[in-house]
């Protein structure tokens, strides 16, 4: 189906594909992709955007303002394929109604929604379009998926771009989460150096949470660990301002409670983000609530130190939208996940492209990103402290333009 949006041409594709790689498994899912083309760009190569997550659908393009705001830069050189990753958007989305099935069956179904399944779907779309090779742009979790793509189907790829998405390889999830705690400690202390009065403010909020006195409009009684997960805001360019503004408010006010509900991660419209989150770092391991198990001693002792993308078991008992998923999440935490990445395959892939690596990234650690990049010498690095993890969006296309120039050997300004 072809539609138009101003000067943009939108071609929509829905394919029915196998759920798993088991030849005896007859289950299928639908996979939806929307191809965005600018007027006059009908013969440009394809660029597949793999978004962050897990569990997020592709952005819906719009004009005035342009969404996503980097799209204009991308469309100068490519036709952009917005793929709804399996389980999201229009790709057989996972909703609470799946919980009518036994928890064991639901958990087994969700094991097919990781990067390996997403790559199989992308390959199906590529073959449907009759394209020998195409290009990828992976943001965060989408970059992890791009690494798996290179590990399995490098011959299908021309140029790859990463923005905050060079995952650790051959490391347990515990290593990643410890590293992220270290970076959250740094960002927490930096926030309090800038706004020293807010350390006591946050400490007082923790006391209210411990007493069960912060109750959101959703009915959630906010726990200490949920409150401290506000630290994820310190992983974006302007998230610190949202945190600052929240802490200015009276914690008993409607404004505070509504704003807090909107700023907390993991408990929103996307249960997969919580349920499958640790599996994103599971490169052939059982995660078993890795982030919770490796919580550093100083974080246990100082409740004003904030956490980031660290998930905790107790949220299954305190967050209304996550309570129905408890049995499924417990099963998945004990699942032995297959490996996603192959360092030798990456080395042999002759991958070319460019990667934005954010020096202060609290979600995808710099040192592990550099280890992974060493397996892909043809991928040029843009290491910067100017942006945080959301640099693709916050730069309104400047980061992407820089990557295009690096990858194609053009003068970079």
Image (cartoon, grey):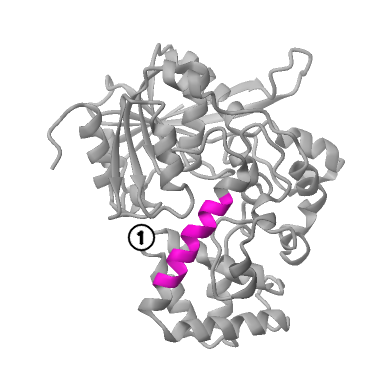
Viewer-proximal residue, 260 or 40?
260
Q: Which residues are magenta?
A: 177-190
As drawn, the residue found furthest toward the front would be 297
- Where is residue 239, by image quadrant? bottom left
Give the crowd class for mark 1: few <14, some 14-19, many >=20 residues within 10 Å. Answer: some
| Residue that badge 1 annotates | 237
Look at the magenta stretch and give its main secondary structure: helix
Residue 184 in percent (x, y) is at: 49, 62
Q: Residue at x 52, y 85 (%)?
A: 201
Instruction: Give the vertical position of 257 relative to 366 (above or below).
Output: below
Quadrant of image for the C terminus: top left
For residue 99, side relative to residue 32 (left or right): right
Q: Residue at x 27, y 22 (%)?
A: 44
Viewer-proximal residue, 114 or 43?
114
Instruction: Give the vertical position of 127 relative to 165 (above or below).
Output: above
- Where is residue 2, by image quadrant? top left
Question: Does 375 lie within the magenta span?
Answer: no
């Amino acid at each position: 189906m072809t539609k138009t949006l101003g000067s943009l041409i939108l071609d929509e594709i829905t394919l029915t594909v196998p759920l798993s790689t088991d030849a005896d498994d007859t289950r299928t899912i639908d996979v939806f992709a929307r191809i965005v083309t600018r007027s006059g760009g009908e013969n440009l190569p394809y660029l597949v955007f793999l978004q962050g997550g897990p569990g997020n659908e592709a952005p819906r393009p719009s004009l005035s303002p342009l969404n996503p705001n980097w799209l204009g830069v991308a469309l100068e050189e490519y036709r952009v394929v917005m793929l709804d990753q399996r389980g999201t958007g229009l790709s057989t989305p996972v909703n609470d109604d799946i919980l009518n099935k036994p928890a064991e069956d639901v958990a087994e179904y969700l094991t097919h929604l990781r990067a390996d399944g997403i790559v199989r779907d992308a390959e199906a779309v590529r073959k449907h379009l009759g394209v020998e090779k195409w290009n990828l742009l992976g943001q965060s979790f989408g970059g992890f998926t791009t690494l798996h793509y290179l590990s399995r189907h490098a011959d299908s790829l021309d140029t790859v771009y990463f923005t905050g998405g060079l995952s650790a390889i051959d490391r347990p999830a515990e290593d990643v989460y410890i590293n992220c705690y270290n970076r959250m400690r740094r960002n927490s202390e930096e926030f309090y150096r800038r706004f020293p009065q807010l350390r006591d403010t946050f400490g007082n909020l923790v006391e209210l949470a411990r007493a069960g006195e912060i109750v959101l409009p959703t009915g959630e009684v906010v726990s200490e660990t949920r409150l401290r997960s506000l630290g994820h805001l310190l992983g974006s360019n302007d998230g610190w301002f949202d945190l600052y503004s929240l802490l200015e408010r009276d914690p008993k006010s409607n404004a505070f409670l509504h704003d807090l509900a909107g700023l907390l991660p993991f408990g929103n419209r996307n249960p997969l983000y919580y349920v499958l989150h640790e599996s994103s770092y599971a490169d052939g391991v059982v995660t078993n609530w890795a982030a919770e198990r490796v919580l550093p001693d100083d974080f246990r002792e100082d409740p004003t130190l904030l956490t980031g993308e660290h998930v905790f078991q107790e949220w299954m008992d305190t967050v209304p939208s996550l309570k129905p998923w408890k049995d499924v999440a417990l099963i998945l935490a004990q699942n032995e996940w297959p490996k996603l990445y192959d360092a030798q395959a990456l080395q042999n892939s002759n991958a070319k492209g460019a990667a934005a690596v954010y020096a202060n990234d609290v979600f995808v650690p710099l040192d592990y990103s550099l280890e992974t990049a060493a397996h892909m010498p043809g991928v040029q690095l843009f290491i910067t402290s100017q942006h945080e993890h959301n640099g693709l969006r916050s730069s309104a296309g400047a980061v992407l333009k820089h990557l295009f120039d690096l990858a194609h050997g053009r003068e970079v300004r």
